[in-house]
Image: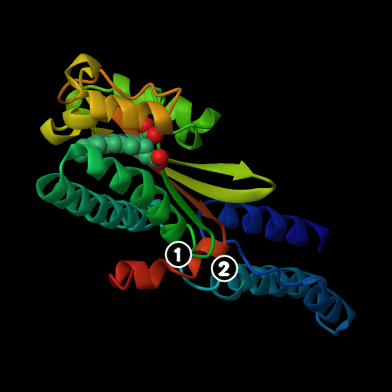
Amino acid sequence: MHFCASIFTISNVAYSKDELPCKTVDVSLIFILLEGGAMSKLIQIWASCAIGIILIAFIGCGGKKVADSDLSRAAGKVVDNFSNELRNELYTAIEDSGVVWAVRICSEKGPLLSARYSSIPGWSVRRVSIRFRNPENAPDDFEREVLQILENRPANAGDEYFRWTEEGGKKTFRFLKAIKVKATCLNCHGPRDKFSADLRKVLDEKYPNDQAYDFGIDDYRGAYSVKITWPDGKVALDSIMAAKI
Ligand code: HEC
């Protein structure tokens, strides 16, 4: 009986590592009931093991598997929405009102979108960079390590990275997608000696420790960084995949 209980515990841990964290199912009651019954020892052992395995497969894990590829697809979708909305507003602002005015879009809209997507229960979404303009966008240790991995990858190795970590005792799915510099970005992140005096003034006032200039086209500028805390972050998955967010 103890042997079966150990198998159950080991399987339960193995399942919850890669999939949905299993609901705690207390099978000890079933073991006790079987042990107290009139069955032969052999049947007792066989039956309790079988029940344990069935519980693990169908009840204990909620019956549904969430693969890492599903999570990274959902994270990628949120990041694409974030990036499209920011880029559209930025490009329109530059065209309509000029680069200096458009600085406001980046400084207000960026944090606003982060806050909006981070209000999804269990999700946190932001932009990070090693050479940051806003110190709020400085990477944590994990993000710094991954930014370096992404930057040093060969060009054909993909621009995304994900890994499970544990934070504050909770399983956390972390996802980063690299951001590269395009021609329009050079207006505010390119060679500083080409910035107008007005632009330098606005940036100096708002970002006295700015490091986000002197980039060139196709340089790594940073990454979108998503954290999904498990299991809280699961609730929004279906809506995200159905494009409701
Ligand atoms: C009009 C000026 C302007 C343009 C154009 C611009 N940015 Fe920025 N960018 C900023 C400002 C201002 C911030 C600081 C935002 C904040 O306070 O969070 C910023 C922040 C960022 C950050 C967050 C990390 C950090 O340094 O704080 C990234 C990543 C970034 N920009 C990438 C880009 C990319 C990629 C482009 C081109 C598609 C671009 N930016 C175009 C002004 C600009």
Left or right side of 98 for 231 = right
- Say which amino acid is labelled 1: Lys
Ligand 1 occupies quarter: top left
The CB of the residue at mark 1 lies under 8 Å from ligand 1: no
Measured along the vertical axis of the image, is residue 220 above or below residue 95?
above
* Number of marks: 2
Left or right side of 206 for 95 = left
Circle 1 is placed at which residue position? 65
Measured along the vertical axis of the image, is residue 39 above or below residue 113?
below
Residue sticking out furthest to the bottom: 38
Q: Where is residue 107 in the image (x, y as percent from the top left)?
A: 37, 43
Left or right side of 164 for 94 = left
Quadrant showing the N terminus: bottom right
Residue shown at the point (33%, 68%) measured from the top left: 245
Q: Is the C-beta separation of discs 1 and 2 under 8 Å?
A: yes
State whether residue 178 appears in this view: no
Q: Where is residue 154 in the image (x, y as percent from the top left)?
A: 22, 22
Residue sticking out furthest to the top: 193
Give me the disc on residue 97. Answer: none
- Front residue of 50/177: it is 177
- Say which amino acid is labelled 2: Cys
Circle 2 is placed at which residue position? 61
Left or right side of 230 for 84 = left
- Front residue of 34/70: it is 70
- Front residue of 114/90: it is 90
As measured in the structure, the alpha-carbon distance from the residue carrying label 1 to the one carrying label 2 is: 8 Å
Q: Position of residue 177 (x, y in %)?
A: 32, 40
Residue shown at the point (15%, 47%) measured from the top left: 97
- Front residue of 78/242: it is 78
